[in-house]
Image (cartoon, rainbow, N blue to C red):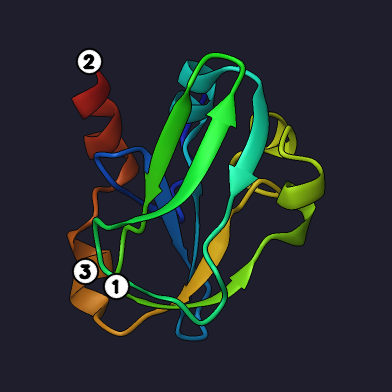
């Protein structure tokens, strides 16, 4: 297991959330999640403008092994989706914490972000 970036928070469902400092949160899946999935071959991203609820299904990642729902770690409006992922879903496997981000959400409830796990707590839950 690689080290987790300490600049973000984590959901039990294996999504990460990064506070961009401008009222938005970038969301992706953890390295652990992409390892479990295997080679990602398709991603269905949420529509820009969609309102999502914390813990609600909002995207789908398909790999050669399985399909997995992606849940929004926070509530808010989808402001952007990663255009690279539609053309090159394998970027999620190559760089899950960087170029492999999935979508950005407008943060409406900072408490939801703070309620997510830090990296140490997330890793402890994987044992």
Mark 2 and mark 3: Cα distance apart in space = 24 Å
Mark 1 and mark 2: Cα distance apart in space = 28 Å
Residue bearing the label numbered 3: 112
Q: Is residue 114 above or below residue 57?
A: below
Return the x and y of residue 10 as percentages of the image width and height: 33, 47
SS for callout 1: loop
Q: Which mark is residue 127?
A: 2
Q: Is residue 15 left or right of residue 34?
A: left
Task: Name the one closer to the observer, 32 or 45.
Answer: 45
Query: Does the rendering let one see residue 1?
Result: no
Return the x and y of residue 53 as percentages of the image width and height: 26, 68
Return the x and y of residue 36 as percentages of the image width and height: 46, 18
Return the x and y of residue 22 as percentages of the image width and height: 52, 85
- Foreground mark, 3 or 1, reads 1
Q: Is residue 105 above or below residue 82?
A: below
The residue at 25%/64% (across/down) is 54
Chain-order first, disc 1 or disc 2: 1
């Amino acid at each position: 297991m690689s080290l987790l970036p300490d600049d973000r928070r984590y959901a039990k469902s294996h999504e990460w959330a990064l506070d961009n400092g401008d009222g938005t949160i970038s969301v992706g899946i953890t390295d652990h999640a992409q390892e479990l999935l295997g080679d990602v071959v398709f991603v269905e991203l949420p529509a820009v403008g969609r309102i999502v609820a914390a813990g609600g299904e909002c995207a789908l990642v398909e790999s050669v092994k399985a399909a997995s729902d992606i849940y929004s770690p926070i509530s808010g409006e989808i402001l952007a989706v990663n255009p690279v992922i539609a053309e090159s879903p394998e970027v999620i496997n190559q760089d899950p914490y960087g170029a492999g981000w999935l979508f950005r959400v407008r943060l409406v409830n900072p408490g939801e972000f703070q309620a997510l796990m830090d990296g140490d707590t997330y890793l402890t839950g994987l044992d």
